[in-house]
Structure formats: structure tokens, C-alpha cells
Amino acid sequence: MSLLDVENLRTAYTVKGKTFYAVDGVSFSVGAKETVGLVGESGCGKSTLGKTVMRLIEPASGKITLDGHDIATLPEAQMRPMRRKLQMVFQDPYASLNPRQTIWQMLETPLKVHGVADPAERRRIIEAMAEKIGFPKASLQRFAHEFSGGQRQRIGIARALILEPELVVCDEAVSALDLSIQAQILNLLVDLKREMGLAFLFISHDLSVVRYISDRVLVMYLGKIVESADHATLWNSPRHPYTRALLSSVPSTDPAKKIGGAISGEISTKIPETGCRFRARCPIAEARCALEAPELKTLPGGNAVACHLA
Amino acid sequence: MIPKPPVLELLKLEVGFPGAPIVKGIDLKIEEGEKVALVGESGCGKSLTAFSILRLLPQAARITGGQVIFDGHDLATLPAHELRRIRGKGIALILQEPMTSLNPVLPIGLQVAENILQHEKLSRRAAKERVIELLDLVGIPNPRERYTMYPHNFSGGMRQRVMIAMAIACNPRLLIADEPTTALDVTIQAQVMDLLEDLCSKLSMAMLLITHDLGAVAQWTDRVAVMYAGRIVETAPIAPFFAGPQHPYSQGLMNSSVDDGWHYSSHRLTEITGNVHSALGERGCAFAPRCPLAAPGCRETPPPLELAGPDWHVACYRRAEAMAPSPVAASH
């Protein structure tokens, strides 16, 4: 049994009276201490999927099993103790920290909510956490605006990890940061993962970052997972034409390695009613792709791909 | 043969807010048809440099010294009405946010036509035909129908194409592109950058690309200038630069970007410790507080840009040490 099992999850949004599914029948799992990357273009539903797993958005149907408990329909009172195991790091370190709280208050609140009643114990935990993220004790009495973007992201990470969760959802956690700061935060995440035995669901549009930090990668297109593979296989022999297109669009820092022809078209906001959702942009689509939607087929070895022609 | 003069030449350009110099003396040449990237982290002054070329500075910011030579004129001191003839015609600009840089209540065709009517003696009808050609050139399908549509009818990538059509409408000799693809997905980034590269060669237009994405620099430009805290620290043709940058900051940038085939299980990223704020109040080299090679001499006066190879300039007192078997690369 995995740490997190998601089965046939759907998340609905209603726009002008019409319902559409931003996440449409997604199944995947995250093992204990595993980092699963989730990539796709903007609008593919990857952030919605992350937030649904966190129960920040209610799922329309499907199962979310965390540590053996189905949390998809738990009422909030019963959900709260589960949140101890499940935390999130957000993209924007400027918007996701309360400007009126000191860092100490931000780190103390989750401990209070989750019943760490002894103030001395809370102090011990907070100070240990501050050391992990490289903050001197004195700086804990300061406010978020006194810190730079990279330092704020460290605070966001500390807040997510203070309860020693098992799974952390990182939604574009390093996307807003400069290159040199991004490296600092990625190294910190790797250190903390090793030290605390964390599993990550790492959502990002930046393929090189996902490639670096993930053990396994899910590729999402218009609400569906189109490919799931371990990191080495995905980058060495991607099967789905969309995965191939994505990978070949990433500019290499080797000027001699020219990128392999940009894929035409754009992700659409209209989901085709039948057939494969990628077919309009697919360079190898056939007549059959317009009629039958390909299922996510598991291949020998555990990887999976949703394409008639892969 | 007399060498052609460069399209644009920045000489000792200084830009700043009252009491706060940001750009501290930049020299940069862009040759005819050349694609030059200006890279650096947020706050290094790269966008301010780009905007000061057309004197589109935020309120209170001023060019406090130096020259911007374009077509024999110094744009830093040119009277406003003469500068207006160069904006959009000689030099065009595209911005990062295609969502906010178009007028939401005007059909896109009219917005592209405005630039043409401003600079060329054309009838409205002829201008419309020219716009339709331009929309077609930048890869917008059904340009005749799209002419009357509004920005909200377009996706991010398509809006950036409209911006490009607007920019190239008067065949500028230089295009300044400030993070043109930062807001776009990688697949769309590749389309837009391929288009810009194609247009540069078709229209023999030079480009100044402002970016923080080293991959984009390697793929789509000819020469790179690395900026740190208001100064250019290294400038080089891209092939030798990416094979082995010489300035410790450029080396740090390369080592902290995730490269092909790196995985956390086997390769720790090299961090540049600290952050850009450490440059504040530094008398010598602005990078010295973060530099693994800094020596006491580095803290006294800023190092000048010196020739370090063919068309290759580096501003570092410790260049010999930086080029020795790299301590930066050896630490992982």
C-alpha cells in the first residue's frame, strides 16, 4: 500500500452554469519517501489536482486514500487530524505568508492547532525547525516583509514541515525564485527529505527542476494523466507524443544542442468530447484517435502511458 | 572595408533613482543583425538598462551619465519629439506581460495599425492590408478575421505574437525583448522564440533579449552579457561562454542551474551563498561578498572589464584563479 492512493479523482468547476472537469478521472499513487513530479502546461489541471488532494478544493468524485484512510469525503472535523500528515508549500512566498504575524507565530499556530499544548515543547520544536532552515533564533521575532524571496520560501517550507508531515505537496515551490536561490531551496528540500523521510508531490511547469528532484513523474494534459514513468525512463525514452513534445521544447544550455522543432498549437480550453485530448496538436494522430479516448495502460515495469500509438 | 558601425552602443551608461544608482556604467555594443542576451537576477538592473535605451523609465528614475548611441544620435539627450520618431520605428520593444500590454477595449488590428500610421504615410486601407500581412507573418491563423478581435479572444502565446507584429510593423533595426516568454509555457516559449529568431534573420533585425533563462540564451542568441548589481561582469559569444564561463558569478549561475541528466540522488546543486542584497554598500567588486574566490584586493575598487579571449570580456581580479581547475565545480 502506498502512502497516498488517488483513484479516479474528478474535480468540477462550474463556469456560467456549465460544469467541466479540470481533473478528470486521475489515478496515481505516491509511495512513502517518494518524490513524484507532476508536469504539464498552464491550464492542464495540475494545481487543481494538488489542491484537491489537499482537500482545499472539494473533489466531485473519486477516492483519496492517505495512509489507509479515505479522505475524499471526510467532514472537516475528522479531516483536521489528517492534515498533520499532509502539508503544502505554495508558489508565491509573498502572498502565502501572513504579513501581520511574526515568523514565530506562523510556526507556532500549526503546533497549537494540532494539540502540542506544552509551550516549552513548542519552543523546542520551533527552534529545531529554525535551525534546519538556517534561521538564527533572533530572526523568528521578525515579520515576513523583512525577508527576501528565498528566505520567505524557507519560512513557507518550515511552516509546512513543523508538524512532521508524511507527504508535502509543493505547488511551483521554486518557480518564483532566481536561479541561485532556486538551487538553495532545491538543496534544502532534498536535505529535509532525507532527514525527515518526506514524500513530495512536486508540481511544476519547469521540466528541468522536476527532472532533478523527482523519482517518478506524471505528465498531465487537459485534466488527464497521459504518462507516468520513473525519471530515467521518462527522460531517456518518453512514450507519449505530448511528453516528447514537452521535453523537446526545453532549451538546453548547450548551444550545440538545438531544440527539436517546436510543437504547433496550444493547450485549448475546450475539452474534446470524444477521442484523445491531445490529438489536435499530435504529430502522429490517426483517425482512431478522434473516436476512442486512450486509457492509461500500465506497461511491464510499472510505467504507464495513455496513447493508442505509443 | 570599413566595418559597419554597431546598431546600438551603450557608453558608460548610468541610470538610477535619486540617491540610488542602479545601473553603474555599462558598455555594450550590438552589431547589425546580432542577437545579444542580457542576463542576470532580479534587481540587477537589466530591465532598467533596456528601458533607458528608449528613455521609458519609471518616474523619478533618470539617466545620470553616459550615452546611448543609435544611428548617430545620443538617445540619452535627444529631444522628445525626435526620440518619438525612433520609438517603434528604429527600435521596437516587446514586454513580458502580453496580458497587460495590449489595450483591452481596442481590436488588435487597430493596435498594430497605430504604429504604422504613426510612422509611415499610408492610407488606412493600405495600413490594414499591411497589418493582415504582419499577423500572417507572425503565425496568427485567419488574420483577416482576427483583425477585428479583442485581446481577450487570444491566448497568452497569441497575444505575444500580436505584440511581435506590432513591434516589427515598421521594420525596426533593433528589437528589445524584455523577458518575452517568461509568462509562457515551454512549448509556447519555443514557438515564440523560434519566430523571433526567424524574423531577425528575415528582416535583418538585431535583438537585445533580456532574460534570466540560460537555456533561452544558449538556444536563441549569439552573444551574452551577464549583469550583476548594475554592472556587466562578463560578455562573450555563446559557444565559448557555455563551454566555460570565466567570471565566478557566471560559473555560479551555470552550476546552480539544473543541467541535463542531473538527479538529486547523485548530484548536489552548487549554491551561490547569500543573496544580491549583500552588494549594497560594497566599494569593490559587487559579487565579492558571495564569491568563493574573493581576496582582500577585490573589496577596494570594482574590477574593469578586460579582454579575456576573442570578443570576450571579463571583470574579475581573480580570473586566473577562476579559470584554474574550477574550485566551484570541484566542490560537489
Image: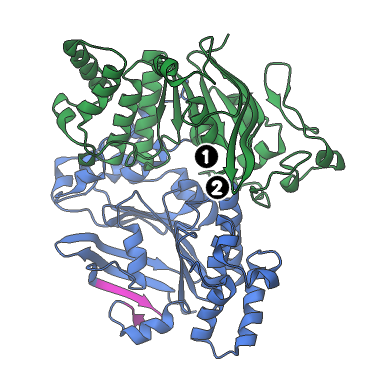
Chain colours: A green, B blue
The dominant secondary structure in magenta is strand
User: In the image, residue B14 lies at what x, y percent?
Assistant: 24, 66
User: In the image, residue B303 lies at what x, y percent?
Assistant: 22, 53
The residue furthest front is: A17
Report the span colored magenta.
B66-75
Which is more toward the observer, B326 or B87?
A: B87
What residue does disc 1 label?
Answer: A205
Give me the residue at 29% from left, 63% from top: B26
Q: Chain of mark 1?
A: A
Compared to residue B11, the image places residue B277 above or below, namely above
Q: CA distance from mark 2 to mark 1?
A: 7 Å
Q: Is residue B13 in view? A: yes
Q: Chain of mark 2?
A: B
> Label 1 sits on what residue type?
His
Mark 2 touches mark 1? (CB < 8 Å) = yes
Q: Quadrant of residue A26?
A: top right
Residue at mark 2 shares a chain with residue at mark 1: no
What residue does disc 2 label?
Answer: B185
Q: Is residue B262 in view? A: no
